[in-house]
Image (cartoon, helix red, strand yellow):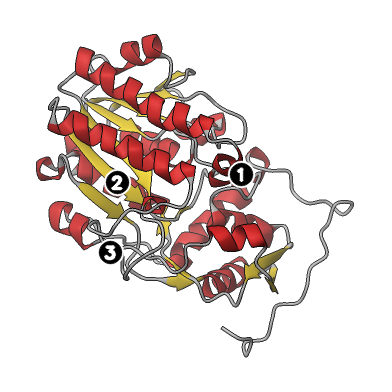
Amino acid sequence: MINQAFSGKSVLITGGMGFIGSNLAIRLAQAGAKVTVLDAMMPDYGGNEFNIAPVKDSITVNFCDIRDDSAVTYLVKDKDYVFHLAGQVCHLMSLSNPFPDIEINITGTAVVMEACRKHNPDAIVVYTGTRGQYGPSVSLPVNEEAPTNPKGIYEISNLTAEKIIRVYNDVHGIRSVLLRLSNIYGPRSQMKHSRFGVCNWFVRLAMDDAPIQVFGDGSILRDFCYVDDCVDAILRAAITEAAFGEIFNVGSDIPVSFLELVKTIVDVAGQGSWQYAEFSAERKAQEPGDFYSDVSKIARFTGWKPTTDLKTGLSKTLDFYRAHRDHYWTPVTATTHVPTTKPQPATAKL
């Protein structure tokens, strides 16, 4: 279905050299789409030329910023689909400097949508936001009708971008789909730091035989969605007419505690260790508590459901980074080795 829908179509992916964007670009290129990737390649944000290696000769790459009106105007012309994934994605940065979030996530989104309105009003736009737009959950699982009370500027800027796009859908007729992603993991994520992508960061620590810290008692719940499932959700939403103007969660309906996640990573990797750690005052203030998504709405509209279980997804992730680690981080050496601790016994407090 997806191959047939996108074969021969012209698409633009903002942030297309990053984690989700590059996986989306590969999938679309393999489906026969004419893919153009836009990426500013900001340091530490995950843009990586190796990410698109499997399709580098069959897609077009434009290194520019979504705030560049002239460049964006040129790139959106004649596109059938615009997948808007570019953004400031570091929650911690937004706590100390709110302006990149405002400039990239809000102004950049307005630039993209104005370019569509003026030069390509027939384009279909898909935007990927974050489950952080909800803030602390009122009830579980969290559905799209839940209140939005985000706890940080990053999440507020994503929510604002979503509302901007919805206005362009409702007022200007730019057909758009709005997605809220929850803890996506898998191949092609940045692995140099821990500021975003907790599951992938834990995978790196296990591969480096460095201890993984489990904050508190490890009982906090999250839902983790493998990147291939996420890409499938994005594509299905894009080709579902009934989805235009709608908001959808993209995550997993199977909650997993952080302790269970870490134990599974160590088990699947066959290496690594973990230890309990106390929350810092900053982490405790930011922690929203349990969260997992209700994905029944997107299932009703598009037929999408996640199909990759956690062990399978982690196995694929580990296989990818073991084969291509040098493109993502420098392995720990004997001189920089971090001492490890033995795994906690199975009777440890949950």
The residue at which mark 3 appears reads as 294
Quadrant where the C terminus is found in the figure: bottom right
Callouts 3 and 2 close, C-beta under 8 Å: no
Classed neighbour count for the residue bearing mark 3: other residues with Cα under 10 Å, few (<14), some (14–19), many (≥20): many
The residue at which mark 2 appears reads as 179
Q: Is residue 16 visible?
A: no
Q: How many marks?
A: 3
In this rendering, is residue 37 above or below 141?
A: above
Which of 75/136 is in front? 136
Residue 46 percent coordinates (x, y):
55, 37
In this rendering, is residue 13 above or below 301?
A: above
Residue 324 marker: 1
Callouts 1 and 3 close, C-beta under 8 Å: no
Residue 83 percent coordinates (x, y):
31, 32
User: Is 270 on the left-hand or right-hand side of 100?
Assistant: right
Q: Residue at x 10, y 40 (%)?
A: 241
Q: Residue at x 17, y 37 (%)?
A: 4
Q: Is residue 122 visible?
A: yes
User: Is 345 on the left-hand or right-hand side of 26?
Assistant: right
In this rendering, is residue 110 above or below 70?
A: below
Q: Earlier in the sequence, mark 1 or mark 3?
A: 3
CA separation, marks 3 and 2?
Answer: 13 Å
CA separation, marks 2 and 1?
Answer: 30 Å
| Snapshot quadrant of residue 16 | top left
| Number of the front mark, 2 or 1 | 2
User: Is 96 on the left-hand or right-hand side of 114?
Assistant: right
Classed neighbour count for the residue bearing mark 1: other residues with Cα under 10 Å, few (<14), some (14–19), many (≥20): some
